[in-house]
Amino acid sequence: MYTTELDKQPKPEKGAKVTSIDGNEPQELVDAFEARVAADEFIEPKDWMPEAYRKTLVRQISQHAHSEIVGMLPEGNWITRAPSLRRKAILLAKVQDEAGHGLYLYCAAETLGTSREEMIEALHSGKAKYSTIFNYPTLTWADIAAIGWLVDGAAIMNQVPLQRTSYGPYARAMVRVCKEESFHQRQGYEAMTVLAQGTEEQKRMAQDALNRWWWPSLMMFGPPDDKSPNTERSMRWRIKRETNDELRQKFVDITVPQAEFLGLTVPDEDLAWNEEKGGYDFGDIDWEEFYAVVRGEGPVAKERMKARRDAWEQNAWVREAADAHEAKKRAAAAA
């Protein structure tokens, strides 16, 4: 509902000095905005904000929403093949949760003045990105367990600080998202525990899944801080609370002992505890692979985008029916 109010933000007074972040906004408004952010106040949709702040949020929130929706695909692929009715019910509920997360986030992004249609078009055209992790295939049931344990674990590490992000609608949406993601991570780890304590074949399956998902999970935190073009500004504006490298380190420190408990081996010969820093040292990430997947060269990137475009086109009748129903309701109310 806020999108129709965005044009009511305060406008510069005539003759106001313009020396802002992007060189075209009045300094007094920028200073007031920066002071509010520094004081940990929430910025709300009707509040004045620099255009660069708005664009950064649209990019981040829409990418987050796209990731939730595309992330349904690799797991939805296993709903009919889950090994038991219990696992099927859990996975079905999880995929449904992810759809809800995407909707919360699209709504949050819409409060910034962009439309759902614009965001979807950006995704389908390749202009907008989603998490690179979903461009890898789910080859066995153990991959579903690994996604829950590692991918959702990395997501939680990223998302918990977003409950304190400076933009109010985004922060509030993340409260419920984080609660549900915590459940997803726990069920993934529980499923991996069952495999790791099972037959020799199941143990091999669990280790193979860890081998394939470990490094892509570390890539989920984004490029190193010195190669991340958005980190510095996002940190200053409290959009992010911790840097990519800080979050990656926390994830490694928490997850390695979990793998050890399972009796599984993290696929990193350079992994070692560093007493001085109180954390693990780990090997170099293959950033060439990361950037290739970002460019859409992941193992199943084309398959993922085809599935999203096909779903959008083939289900256009649902949107049309919903629009027609809403039009009838409005006409009846106006009569």
Image (tube, grey):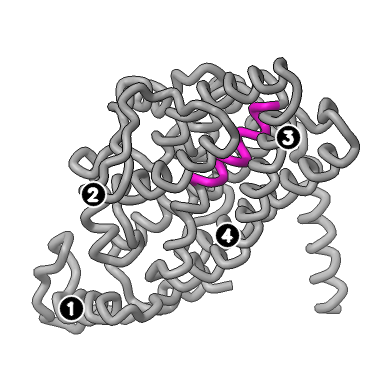
The percent position of residue 109, horizontal first and vertical second, equals: 50, 59
Mark 2 vs 3, N-terminal side: 3
Residue 287's image quarter?
top left
Mark 1 vs 2, N-terminal side: 1
The relative height of residue 282 versus residue 187 in the rendered view (above or below) is above
Mark 1 vs 3, N-terminal side: 1
Amino acid under label 1? Asp
Secondary structure type for disc 1: helix
The answer to whether residue 285 is left or right of residue 139 is left
Secondary structure type for disc 4: helix
The percent position of residue 288, horizontal first and vertical second, equals: 31, 21
Residue at 49% over, 26% down: 265
The answer to whether residue 67 is left or right of residue 10 is right
User: Residue at label 1?
Assistant: 31
The relative height of residue 94 versus residue 133 in the rendered view (above or below) is below
Mark 4 vs 3, N-terminal side: 4
Amino acid under label 4? Cys
Q: Which residues are magenta?
A: 142-154
Label 3 near label 4: C-beta < 8 Å?
Answer: no
Question: Is residue 50 visible to the viewer in this orientation of the structure?
Answer: yes
User: Residue at label 2?
Assistant: 277
User: Residue at label 4?
Assistant: 178
User: How far is mark 2 from mark 4, CA to CA?
Assistant: 28 Å
Amino acid under label 3? Val
Secondary structure type for disc 2: loop
Main SS type for the magenta part? helix
The relative height of residue 139 versus residue 215 in the rendered view (above or below) is above
Of residue 210 and residue 316, the one placed in the foreground of this image is: 210
Residue 141's image quarter?
top right
User: Residue at label 3?
Assistant: 194
